[in-house]
Image (cartoon, helix red, strand yellow):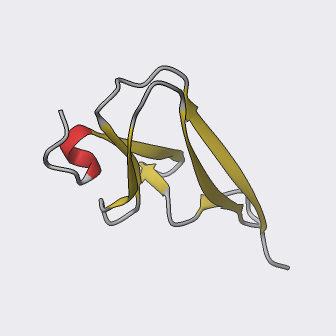
Amino acid sequence: MAGSTITLRLTIADPVAGVAYSLQDKANMPIEPQIAGDGSISFDAPITQTDDGRLTGTFVRREGPSRRFVYIAIGTSAGLHASE
């Protein structure tokens, strides 16, 4: 039986205008950077929970045997070197 997939919507309510934000994949690559404007900024990250309870997916990062997280890159780390 395959795991179930959900989509997390991560929203930064008050980002710094003019600064780039992006999801970062497991290979540390920024994905679809966005330049913040006046409003909030959101990212959708599909997450799969395996049958044994582990969280996996393109954007799921890991630290140690059990800690899992989704990383949002900011500024030049988001891949736009002209970003503040």
Tell me the quarter of the picture where residue 45 sits.
bottom right
Q: Position of residue 49 (x, y in %)?
A: 72, 60
User: In this rendering, would 29 be left or right of 66?
Assistant: left
Q: Is residue 43 left or right of residue 73?
A: right
Q: Is residue 9 above or below residue 58?
A: above
**Residue drawn 64% across the image and 60% down it:** 46
Q: Quadrant of the N terminus?
A: bottom right
- Towards the viewer: 80 or 50: 80
- Residue 5 on image: x %, y %: 75, 63
Q: Quadrant of the C terminus?
A: top left
Q: Residue at x 28, y 48 (%)?
A: 78
Determine whether, in the image, residue 8 is placed left or right of residue 21.
Answer: right
Query: Quick one: 31 or 46, which is closer to the camera?
Result: 31
Q: Is residue 74 left or right of residue 53?
A: left
The residue shown at (49%, 46%) is: 70
Picture mark count: 0
Q: Residue furthest bottom?
A: 1
Q: Residue furthest right?
A: 1
Residue 30 sits in quarter: bottom left
Q: Position of residue 50 (x, y in %)?
A: 72, 66
Q: State the residue lying farthest toward the left.
A: 82
Residue furthest toward the front? 38
Vertical order, 9 against 38 (above or below): below
Residue at coordinates 19% horizontally, 40% vertically from top-left? 83
